[in-house]
Amino acid sequence: MSFGRPPSISTGFQVTPPDRGSFPLDHYGECKDQMMAYVTCLRNNSNSSTPCRHLNKAYLECRMNKGLMERDEWKNLGLSNVEKEAKPAKD
């Protein structure tokens, strides 16, 4: 029994790639404006992401354009039916 280390270390450690959704940090703030707009939208909508989906799409688009995440299809990211700009709510 070994205390203070994971038991798998004695059988060999194997590196695996990160799961989907794990990507490099934006150390230089290249997409900070898009991120702040999204976070502000979440705060203004009681953390409901539905009204902020267009901002989420803009943020992920920025990350893909800057090489901070791999380019993927919007349908795989759950944003295929989201317009780039929010449409005003109909009364």
Image (tube, rainbow, N blue to C red):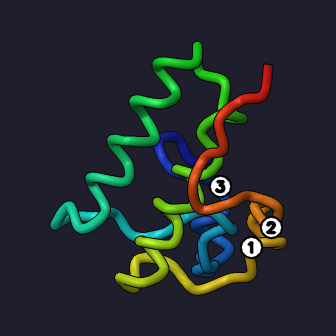
Residue 59: percent from the left, percent from the top? 46, 60
* Amino acid residing under circle 2: Ser
User: Which residue is disc 3 drawn over?
Assistant: 7
Instruction: Classify residue 91 by image quadrant.
Output: top right
**Residue at the outermost top position:** 46
Q: Mark 2 vs mark 3: which is more N-terminal?
A: 3
User: Which residue is disc 1 drawn over?
Assistant: 74
Residue 77: percent from the left, percent from the top? 74, 66
Distance between mark 1 and mark 2 Cα atoms: 5 Å
- Circle 2 crowding by C-alpha within 10 Å: few under 14, some 14–19, many from 20: few
Q: Are marks 1 and 2 in contact (CB under 8 Å)?
A: yes
Q: Mark 1 vs mark 2: which is more N-terminal?
A: 1
Q: Which mark is residue 80?
A: 2
Distance between mark 3 and mark 1 Cα atoms: 40 Å
Query: Callout 3: helix, strand or loop?
Result: helix
Nearest-to-viewer mark from 2 and 3? 2
- Residue at 52% from the left image edge and 50% from the top image edge: 55
- Residue at 50% from the left image edge and 62% from the top image edge: 58
In the rendered structure, the answer to whether residue 29 lies left or right of residue 2 reads left
- Circle 1 crowding by C-alpha within 10 Å: few under 14, some 14–19, many from 20: some
In the rendered structure, the answer to whether residue 11 lies left or right of residue 6 reads right
> Looking at this view, is 10 or 61 the one in front?
61
- Residue at 42% from the left image edge and 71% from the top image edge: 62
- Residue at 51% from the left image edge and 72% from the top image edge: 61
Q: Mark 3 vs mark 1: which is more N-terminal?
A: 3
* Amino acid residing under circle 3: Pro
